[in-house]
Image: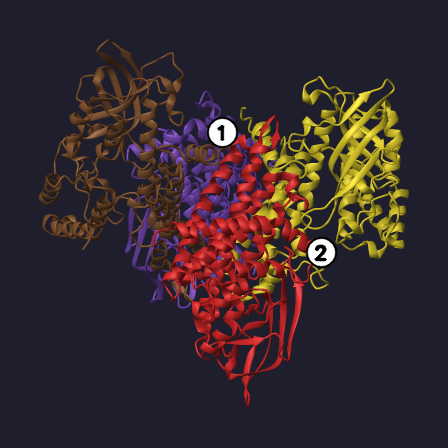
Chain colours: A brown, B yellow, C purple, D red
Amino acid sequence: MTNLDSFRQEVRDWLEVNCPVSMRRPYESEADLFWGRHNGGFQSEDQKIWFEHMVARDWTAPAWPKTYGGGGLDNEQVKILREELGRIQARPPLESFGISMLGPALLKFGSEDLKRQHLPAIVRGEVRWVQGYSEPNAGSDLASLQMRAEDRGDHFLVNGSKVWTSYGELGDWMFCLVRTDFEARKHEGISFVVFDMSLPGVTTRPIKLISGASPFTETFIEDVRVEKDQVVGEINKGWNVAKYLLTHEREMIAQAGLSNAGNTSLGETATEVFGLSNGVLRNTMLRSDIARFEMDERCLDLTIERVHDEVNAGVSLGASSSMFKFYGTELNKRRFELLMAIHGNDALLWQGKESKGGYLPRTWLRSRGNSIEGGTSEIQLNIIAKRILDLPG
Amino acid sequence: MTNLDSFRQEVRDWLEVNCPVSMRRPYESEADLFWGRHNGGFQSEDQKIWFEHMVARDWTAPAWPKTYGGGGLDNEQVKILREELGRIQARPPLESFGISMLGPALLKFGSEDLKRQHLPAIVRGEVRWVQGYSEPNAGSDLASLQMRAEDRGDHFLVNGSKVWTSYGELGDWMFCLVRTDFEARKHEGISFVVFDMSLPGVTTRPIKLISGASPFTETFIEDVRVEKDQVVGEINKGWNVAKYLLTHEREMIAQAGLSNAGNTSLGETATEVFGLSNGVLRNTMLRSDIARFEMDERCLDLTIERVHDEVNAGVSLGASSSMFKFYGTELNKRRFELLMAIHGNDALLWQGKESKGGYLPRTWLRSRGNSIEGGTSEIQLNIIAKRILDLPG
Amino acid sequence: MSLVLNEEELMLRDSAHNFLHSRAPVSHLRELRDCHSSTGYSPELWAEMGETGWTSILVPEEFGGLGYGYVEMGIILEESGRTLTPSPMLGTALVGVTALNMAGTAKQCSSILPAVASGNYLLALACDEISQHEPDHISCTATRTDGGYQITGHKTAVLDGHIADTFIVSARVGSETALFLIPAGFEGVTVEPYRVLDTHLAANVQFQQVEVGEAHFLGRPAGGQRILERILDVGRIGASAEMLGVALEAFERTVQYLKERKQFGVPIGSFQALQHRAARLFGDIEMCKSLVLKALHELDERPDGNAELASLAKARLGETSRQATAEAIQLHGGIGMTDEFDIGFFLKRSQILDNLFGDVCYHLDRYARLRGY
Amino acid sequence: MSLVLNEEELMLRDSAHNFLHSRAPVSHLRELRDCHSSTGYSPELWAEMGETGWTSILVPEEFGGLGYGYVEMGIILEESGRTLTPSPMLGTALVGVTALNMAGTAKQCSSILPAVASGNYLLALACDEISQHEPDHISCTATRTDGGYQITGHKTAVLDGHIADTFIVSARVGSETALFLIPAGFEGVTVEPYRVLDTHLAANVQFQQVEVGEAHFLGRPAGGQRILERILDVGRIGASAEMLGVALEAFERTVQYLKERKQFGVPIGSFQALQHRAARLFGDIEMCKSLVLKALHELDERPDGNAELASLAKARLGETSRQATAEAIQLHGGIGMTDEFDIGFFLKRSQILDNLFGDVCYHLDRYARLRGY
């Protein structure tokens, strides 16, 4: 038995004991997950137990160094842990932008003090982090952001507003792009800072979407003091950190679009609704659209598999996250267009128990934002054209 | 009986007597038409009779003024004549770029002398005209053309080459864009000139297309003398003439894409090949593409009808020729894609009697050029965006 | 007939435009939603529309109407699409009146049409029974009784079902399809309203052993399926006219936004990729304009109907209004996703109208069948 | 198995690339066309390919081959797609050898495969009978006689039919499908070659009361339809690999042209509308790369075949190579339409390969059926 085999066995045994049965079911929405403090409440005793066991095992961030509370696992081990968690359909014990976004940036760019201050708290789910990137006039053109951080010697005084902060009202701390040099060219005067959202001067306002939900806020910052040691990376070099993180974000969004992969296929769903005639879906026109969709979905899955294998083999495709972001989100929009067509009259129900509170039309509407948030599809195509194809201009 | 009714009766009676029965059938290719001199040969005695009768009646260019050999008919009369010609499926007695392109430019921009010199000869089919616009480095960016016309006092000395001259080897005279001011901004140094192609220094070379046919030539001009009275419009103002003519050309090309309108529908053709099953085309996937195509085709026909009616009602949609050029050519490409799919193995035959010398695949290949010649689809979209939608930049 | 609006029609369009923009712009829809209106439309506004004559457009003069044609009705619907104004125009003034004009007895017409014309009576066509529009699959039955018929069945997605005074109901009589006029107040009729995604309401309607007399046949007992299809085709063309308005308004707002919104120091409308998308959409909408006008003309000129053109219009407008509203959101970016901004309402209405009386796929299929393949 | 080429496979790709670019670039195809070659390929080049071992890739070692797998064969086909090199690789070295490997008797294999491996024997699958690929509609019949069977029928669009030594022919035996190995020289076999649009040749083949013995069954008499489908699936995946090469090369040449060609004073590749189209196409081709590699892996790993993946690959590559070659012409502009320039050859080959063994629509339909709808 190789070391990896015995590691797998160890993981499997441990999970058998430590993952409560009720945590071995797919979750229905992000609200079913534990996100760490803001309020810190658990939805169930099992959720709490599962989280605490994983924290104790240092596996909420299995790949991070042990020094900062991570699991210290290597790539192969992380892959095995993921596979074993997937095998029993274990829910994530802790969902967190701290783990998925800030952490990687801190590990790569942060000072030793910053890492020690923030990473262990993230791993233990003690702080809920939110992101402050976009501003009302800095969307696709993110680098034109205007939030001002004035140098006051030992600290910055920050003023301005951010928009599209996911779950901003639930945030404990924010990581944020601010302008620290007002004369420099636009990419060169930006810094990446973190601050406590409970400070006076920080307020949020929910943004209601066309789906009726409000998963984002506007965040207003008025005369907030940010210590200089809370800058990640060098002052005025925050754009490098931002680019690094945007790549992470694109990958997350592309993956999110694929989270339906295990669900009933569109073909099956359509067959339930329309039935077959001579072995063929009765709605023959929709059948053509569904077949094309299923083909494209499979192609994307295979490409994610291939690029993953390539990365492991040391071959790297630059800017592939842009391709995945583009395809993943466009496909997810198509999925919901097709589901709306399949469910016809039923797909229009906006309220009520029968429709799970209008789950389908609201999710359809929400999916429209996939190709906007985290860099629009247009921005991704620009990146592919310029960085991969090396087209001029 | 109104004047128009009696005119219609007159036309009908005249055609009955003067249009030979063999000329009342759709033609299969442009080669079946009489194009006027170069060699001046007719394909049949009937073709000659039909042409001569129409010339004698002044109806080869029915809308042109009588002074220049035209029919002098008003819009309503021209429409009636067209309808009556269409009713008996009469072939055009004379196909000519002189009538469709140069004539309108001369009428609008030409000097009185130029009109008298050239228009009557066009009407009588005595001169075959060809067009010299594009150059190897001036395609979409037509105004960057480099053919030099040096001012030698009473004449220009012309040097350079043109490309994509339709039937250039058959031309008697050429109308042509040349650069007459080498310092001016690119749109402002261009003149529109005409010259005799039998002059020494004019040579042509056929351009073979991917379809195997050579409907275009390159044309080389070396030290050709063009008198100054052979400039259409003002010297250095040729771009205005060119723009006017390009609009005409777009309309012609868009119409050409529609010449199949009277043919068997794709649905019928596909039904012959695949047959029906339960009343539905057996190739159900192709059925979806065919239905969409037929819908788009009908929409374009209706839009041509509407814009025509609007023009008659004095409402004019600017730049609509770009829209028709774009849609007409893209639809024609789709038509041939679908025909290729419908005919499958048979569509690949390149030679031989059975396939009429590979008519289908060659026409399919030729159709690919529709969205390039006469201004690419991309150029048309630019024009719509800027001139109709008034988008900036 | 020329495919151009004549002077009277242009005047009607201008006055409809002015009326709707001043009395019922998109904010009107928003208010109805935010106050959780149980009707989903404003009865006061409907009364005004009645006074303006819109409810009377298709009602023959003998029944107190204006006796105008479908082109006029299409103009109103297109303009309503631009402002997303909710009202019973489509369900009652177009579909309901058409049904009576086509098939109603003199008595039915004289008792209902004047009330419709005066804005005091609403109709609703109840034909769908499952999640998909399949008007020839009818489980609702009308069983012969001593005095007439007993009707039992379930109808779903009934447009204006929650406010209708009378339903036009398709039911099986033996192997035949018949249409019945069933007042909402009849015993055994249960209406369950529900809200759909753009804040409109619709209803499921139960018919539980509803007793009706011979007089409740819409016209003659025979040939119901054919009449139903013709009524539906009129509704489809009306929905297409409304979708044209939705698509046009969404497109024009988007083009305007492309000129105003700056990123990277320039208006985003200067980016060629967006220009080309806008230019294509412009062309698609121009195609749709011709199609809708032609379809309306045909309704006025051919009483037999033109099923092919109705399916063509419904499919093509469904496609283009989907495209126009989806592009509207994408090109507006984040702000287009917010409820505060109006553009999302166009996407929602487009979905409702695409679904109504058969969606794109339904009509692609029907079109191909009608053309013999 | 990881979706990455291993070192040996990368080396094979490089050597195939070098061989084809030096010995048989697109100009090789052009020369064959311009000299009106009656074979449509170069027998000398084929002999070289044999020496290089390409004809032996799938031939088991016991029959003088290399016994490699489909991934290796796919690499050769993809590279052949890039250079549009005409040769019997697909028809003989892939499809023909696969048929014998799957179903041939020991005697058939030992008599044919060594000759194939040495480059001296060509095979052709004859299954289409009408203008469309419908492998389960077979009119060709094999009638029992005293000494064996008499075969009568007509096959069309037979790839390499004009040069094959032996045909693999589908025929009906009663209600069953059987496959026969019929030498081209047998009495009653008539081959009518014809030229197709990219200068390749194909043939119609008549079988007029051709007498064959039991030994001419490909393997056992039973289960022919299933074996035929499996052989075809291999051919489909092979054609997909070749289309990938066609699409990739057309795309890369186009991107290069976008960087070089100037209009309006700038490279046309700086226009955003063209950039976005190129970026989408790039993504589509990346998807195709994964798909082709996966399909080849599956052929190596699952002897039972994976029909779903074969149809997926054939449909998706048909779509993308059509798109890539059409965009190649459009973005090259006028010069792309000239015979003098090579890019048009890619469009032509793409059409041939899309049509071979079922086109996009055929495989969309088959894919949906295989997935149960």
> Residue C342 location, x and y as percent?
38, 31
Position of C140 compared to A48: left or right?
right
Q: Are marks 2 and 1 on the same chain?
A: no
Determine the secondary structure under disc 2. loop
| Residue C135 visible within the image | no
Does residue D191 sit above or below A172 in this rendering? below
> Residue C317 location, x and y as percent?
49, 44
Tag 1 residue: C255
Check residue A235 in the rendering and tell me which mark sits there, or answer none: none
In this rendered view, identify the residue nearer to me: B102 or D306: D306
Does residue A157 sit above or below A279 in this rendering? above
Q: Residue at x 44, y 41 (%)?
A: C89
| Residue A154 visible within the image | yes
Position of D370 compared to A12: left or right?
right
> Residue C279 location, x and y as percent?
54, 34
Mark in front: 2 vs 1 = 2
Position of D278 compared to A62: left or right?
right
Tell me the kind of residue under disc 2. Answer: Cys
In this rendered view, identify the residue nearer to me: D156 or A139: D156
Q: Circle 1: is it few (<14), some (14-19), or many (20+) Cα within 10 Å?
A: many
Task: Name the chain under label 1.
Answer: C
Does residue D119 sit above or below D19 in this rendering? below
Q: Residue furthest bottom?
A: D146
> Residue A291 location, x and y as percent?
42, 55
Tell me the kind of residue under disc 1. Answer: Val
Tag 2 residue: D35
Alpha carbon separation for disc pair 2 and 1: 56 Å
Determine the secondary structure under disc 1. helix
Q: Residue furthest top?
A: A153
Does residue C59 sit above or below A146 in this rendering? below
Task: Name the chain under label 2.
Answer: D
In this rendered view, identify the residue nearer to me: C358 or D294: D294
